[in-house]
Amino acid sequence: MLLESRGDRVFNALIYLILGLVTIIVLYPLVFVFSASISDPQTVLRGEMLLWPKGINLNSYAKIFQNKDILSGFSNTLLYTSVGTLINLGMTIIAAYPLSRKDFVGRNWFMGLFVFTMFFGGGLIPTYLLIKDLGMLNSFWVMIIPNAVSIWNIIIMRTFFQQSIPYELQEAATIDGCSNIQILNRIILPLSMPIIAVMILFYAVGHWNAFFNALLYLSDKDKFPLQLILREILIQGQTSDMVKMSTESAIKQQREVEGIKYAVLVVANIPVLILYPFLQRYFVKGVMIGAIKG
C-alpha cells in the first residue's frame, strides 16, 4: 500500500473541497425550486423558506394540470422530442457510417463539406425566408426538419465507428456476403449502444429545450412547445387565466403566481431527470471514445 505524502493529502483535500462547493452551487437551486414549488407561497415570498419546504401546499401543481395550455405544450414537446430524436438518430447514423468506411470514395471531401457548414451559415433572415418558401411556417415539421442533423454529432459517431469497431470485422462480414446495410444493422449498430445512448440524450435534451425555432416559426398557440408556454408564464406573467383575478385579492394572486412559476419549472425538468439515469452508464464511455477526433 502506497503512503500518501503530506502534499498529496493537502491536494486531495483541496479537490474534495472544490468538488463540494461545486456540488452545493449546482444542487442548491434545484432543491430550492422543488421546495418552493411544494411550500406555502406566502413563506416563499417572505423569504422564510431557504432550502427545505415549509407548509406543504400542492395547489400549484393542481392548477398546472388543470391548465389546457400547459398540457398542450407538454404533449407537443413530447411529440417533437420523440419524433425529432428518432429522425436525428437515423440521419446521424446514415451519415456517420459511410464516412467511417475506408473504402468510401470521396469521404474526406464530404467530411470537409459537412465541416464547412459548421463555420458558415445562411443567417437568420435567409433561413426564415427558406423555411417560408418551403411552406413549413407554423407547421409540425418546422420543429423537426431545420435541426434534423448535427454535424458535431456526426463527427463523434463517425469517430466511434472508426475507433471502437475493427475494420477487419466489416471486411470479414463482406467476405461472408453481407451488404453494407446488413453490416450496419447486424454488426455496427449492436456494437454501438454507448454512442447511440449518448446521441439520444444529446438530441432529446436539445428538442426538449427547443425554444428559438418555436418563437420564430410558430404562431398557433396549440402548436407551442412547453418552453414557449413557460416563457409566457415566467416572463410575460400570463398566469391570470389560472388564478381568479376578479374574485381574489391581489396579494393572494401574487402568491399563487409565485407557486405556479416554481411548479412549472419542476414539471418541465422531470422528463430529462428521468431519462438521464438510464443513459448515464453509457455516457462517459460513449463521449470519451467518440470525442477522439480522427
Image: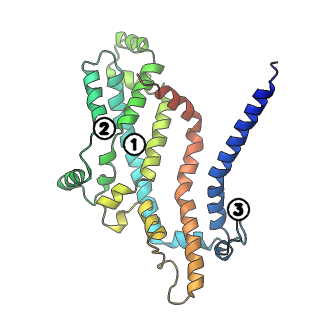
Spatial separation of the CA atoms under disc 1 and disc 2: 26 Å
Nearer the observer, 245 or 169: 245
Q: Is residue 151 left or right of residue 3?
A: left
Q: Report the disc number at residue 119.
A: 2
Q: Which residue is mark 1?
A: 86
Q: Is residue 48 left or right of residue 96?
A: right
Element carrying mark 2: helix
Q: Is residue 133 left or right of residue 62?
A: left
Residue 251 drawn above or below residue 80: below
Residue 184 seen in the figure = yes
Local crowd at mark 2 within 10 Å, few (<14), some, or many (≥20)?
Answer: few
Spatial separation of the CA atoms under disc 3 and disc 2: 44 Å
Q: Nearer the viewer, mark 3 or mark 2?
A: 2
Q: Nearer the viewer, mark 3 or mark 1?
A: 3
The numbered mark, 3 or 1, whose residue comes first in the sequence reads 3
Element carrying mark 3: loop
- The quarter of the rendered structure image containing the N terminus is top right
The numbered mark, 1 or 2, whose residue comes first in the sequence reads 1
Mark 3 near mark 1, Cβ–Cβ under 8 Å?
no
Q: Report the disc number at residue 53.
A: none
Spatial separation of the CA atoms under disc 3 and disc 1: 39 Å
Q: Position of residue 222 (x, y in %)?
A: 36, 66
Element carrying mark 1: helix
Residue at the spot 40% in from the left edge and 57% down from the top edge: 211
Label 2 sits on what residue type? Phe
Mark 3 near mark 2, Cβ–Cβ under 8 Å?
no
Q: Position of residue 41 (x, y in %)?
A: 64, 74
Way the structure is coloured:
rainbow
Q: Report the disc number at residue 51.
A: 3
Label 3 sits on what residue type? Leu
The numbered mark, 3 or 2, whose residue comes first in the sequence reads 3
